[in-house]
Image (spheres, helix red, strand yellow):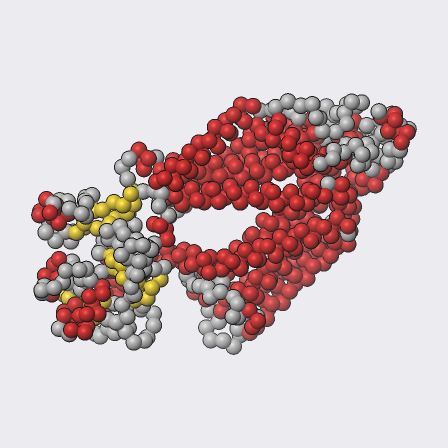
Amino acid sequence: MPEEQPYYGKHGEPRKYDPTFKGPIYNRGCTDIVCCIFFIICILGYFAVGILAWTQGDPRKVIYPTDSRGQFCGQAGTPLETKPLLFYFNIMKCASPMVLLEFQCPTTQMCVEKCPDKFMTLLKAYTNKEDFKYYKNFCKEGLEGLTVTQILSSGLCPAMLTPSKPFTRRCFPALDQKKGGEITVGNNSKFDDGEGNIRDAKDLVAGVKNATVVIEARQVVMKIFEDYTQSWYWILIGLVIAMLISLLFIVLLRFLAGIMVWVMIVMVILVIGYGIVHCSMEYVSLKSEAGSNVTLKDLGFQTDFSVYLHIRQTWLAFIIILAIVEVIIILLLIFLRNRILIAIALIKEASRAIGYVMSALFYPLFTFALLSIVIAYWAVTAVFLSTSNQPIYKVFNETACDHSRKICEPANFSTSSMKAECPDSKCLFAFYGGETVYHKYLIGLQFYNVFLFFWCANFVTALGQMTLAGAFASYYWALVKPDDMPAFPIFSSLGRSLRYHTGSLAFGSLILSIIQIIRVLLEYIDHKLQGTQNKCTKFLLCCLKCCFWCLEKFIKFINRNAYIMVAIYGKNFCTSAKDAFFLLMRNMIRVAVLDKVTDFLLFLGKLLIVGLVGIFAFFFFSGRVKAFENTAPNLHYYWVPILTVVVGSYLIAHGFFSVYAMCVDTLFLCFCEDLERNDGSLARPYYMSASLHDILSENKAVEETEEPTQSSTHQPDDQDVQLKQ
C-alpha cells in the first residue's frame, strides 16, 4: 500500500506528482534579467572607479614617510634614496590639537640617514667643530656663515637633538631606556627652544610623552603592518597546511564517514582539553614570578599585548573560557546522542552523493580563487583611492598672522606676500587632499568600492551554492545512478547558473549586501557617537545592530535554500525563495532535528582543523619550541600571525566543509519534495534510497505529533524504472 501523505497545514500547497519531472529542469529561461543588467552596469562602473583610482593614486604615500616638501624618504632613484628615515625638528608640536585635524605635525620634517643618538643643543654644538658637523646631518642646507640666531630664525636647524629610535621609518624619542644618550633631567634644568622661549627641561619630557600618546594608536597599527611584512611567508604556509588538512578530512569523510565523525568529536574534546591543560601550566608557572598577580583592571590597556601573557589572570580567563566551551560541547553530545547517530547516517548518504560528484571536492578552490580576486581588487582600489589626493601645503606661524593655516606653494613661498607679511612663517606639507570634483567625491567612491566588494563577494558565494546544489540535485533525481546523471554535473550546473540565473544570483546577493552595508554604517555611527550618546541612543543603536544581525542570518538562510530551488526548477529568485520557505515550514520538525544537528557536527570538524593549525602556529611563532627559534621571524606581536592563521584556517575549512553542508541541505530539500511528489508505489516510486528514507523517517516519537508515521520503501528496481518512464 502506498504511504499516506502527511498533513501540511497552511504553509503552501505541497508538490503534486509530475511524471515528466526528472530532476533539474534543462529547458529553462533567463531569470531576473533587470537585476542582471543592473549588476553588469555596476561592475563596469566598478572597473571605471578602479581605473580612475589607479591613474590618480600613489601607493608610495603608504610605504614611504613624507618630509615637509612632500618628498618621499628613501625612495629609490631620488636624492633621498640614502635617507629612509623621517626626523621632526620639534616633536613636542606633534602634541598640538591641530594634529588631530590635519594629521600632520606643525613642525619642519626632513629625511635623514639615521636618527640622532645623543642629546645636544644647537648653541652647544655650534661651539664645537665635530659636534656641529654631526648636527648638520639634521639641518637644511645653507648654514655657511650664519650665526646661531640666524639659523634658528630661518628654521634651518632644530633647536636641539633628542636621542631617538627609528620606528615605522620615523624617529621617535627613546625615553624608555637608561642607556647612553638618554635625556637626564635635573631639578633646575633649562633650555632655549630656539624660538625665544626659556623652558624647563621637564616640559621637554612631558611634551614628548604627550606627542607619543597622540601617535600611539598609529604606532600599534604600523607595528602590526611590520609584523605582516615579516611573517607573510609563514602565514601563507600555515594556510596551505590548513587547506591540505581540510582536503584530507573531506576525502576521509567520503570513505570513512562514520568513523571520521566520531574521530572529529573525540579530537575536538582532546584539543580543547589540551588547551585547558596548557593554560593551567602557564598559570601555575607564573605563580612565583614578581608582578604576575597584577589584575587586568589595574594593568589597563597596553599596546604591547605580550604583557598580558605575563599576568596570571589572563591565563585564568583562558582556562574558564575553554572549560565552558568544553562543557557545552560535551553536554550537547550527551543530549543529542540519538540525533547525532541519525545525522551521521545522513552524512554517510551525502558521502555517497559526493562519491558520484567527486569534482565537487575541488570546487571550493575555484570559489576561493574568485574571492581572492575580489578581495585583491577591493584592497588595491582602496589603497589607490586613499592615496590619490594631492599634497597640500599650509602656512604655519607661531605669532599672529592673517595667513596662518592658509594654502601656500613651497616653491615660491620665500618671495610671496605671505612671507613678507609674516616673516617667521613657514610653508609646510600639511596633508593630502584636493579641490577638484574627483577629490570632493572621494568618500563616495570609497563607499562604492566597499559596497561592490560586498556584492561581488556575496555573488561568488551564491554562485558556488547554486552550482553545488544543481550538481547534487542531479544526483538525487537520477532514478538510476549514475546512468541518469550528466557526465560532468559540476560543469553543467555552473553553466546553467551563469547562463540563466546570473540575475537571480545578483538579486539575492544584492539584498544581503544592502543589509551588510547598513550594519557597517551602524557600526560607523556608533563609533562616531561614542562618548556623546545618551542611554536612549545607545540602546536604540544596540537594538538596530542586533536586529540587522538577525536579519542578515535569516536572509543567508533564505538565499541558500532559494538557490537550491532555482538550481532545480529554474524559476526567479522571489518565487524560489517563497517555495523553499514554505517547503521548510511544512517540514519544520525535520529541519530542527536533523539539518541543524548535521551542521553542528560539521562545525566540530571546522573547529578541529582550526585547533590543530592554531596550536602549531602558536608554538612556531611564539618560539616555545627550540627547533623553531632560528626559523621563526622576529615580531613585535607574535599573536598577529597566529590570529591571522586561525581566522584564515577557519575560512578555508568552512569553504571545504561547505561542500558537505550544501550536499546535506540539497538532499534534505529534495527528500521533502520527493515525499510530496511520490508515495513509494510502483507507479510513483521514491527517488531516494531505502537507507536515506529510513534515516529521515526516524525519530517517530517526535514526528507523530506533526504528521503520520512513514514506513520505509525499497530502492526502485528495473521494473520501477520502466513504470516511471
Residue 660 in the image: above or below residue 615: above
| Residue drawn at x 21%, y 50% as measured from the top left | 428
Near-viewer residue (204 or 328): 204
Residue 719 in the image: above or below residue 264: above
| Residue drawn at x 19%, y 45% as measured from the top left | 409
Q: Residue furthest front?
A: 77
Q: Residue 54: x and y, percent?
A: 39, 41
Near-viewer residue (214 or 485): 485
Of the 4 image quadrants, the one containing the N terminus is: top right
Q: Is residue 284 visible?
A: yes
Side of 285 relative to 465 (left or right): left
Q: How many marks?
A: 0
Q: Is residue 708 visible?
A: no
Q: Residue 567: x and y, percent?
A: 67, 31
Residue 251 in the image: above or below residue 208: above
Side of 515 relative to 161 (left or right): right
Near-viewer residue (43 or 430): 43
**Residue 155 picture quarter:** bottom left
Near-viewer residue (225 or 631): 631
Side of 220 relative to 119 (left or right): right
Q: Residue 222: x and y, percent?
A: 39, 57
| Residue drawn at x 17%, y 60% as measured from the top left | 141
Of the 4 image quadrants, the one containing the C terminus is: top right
| Residue drawn at x 70%, y 29% as measured from the top left | 568
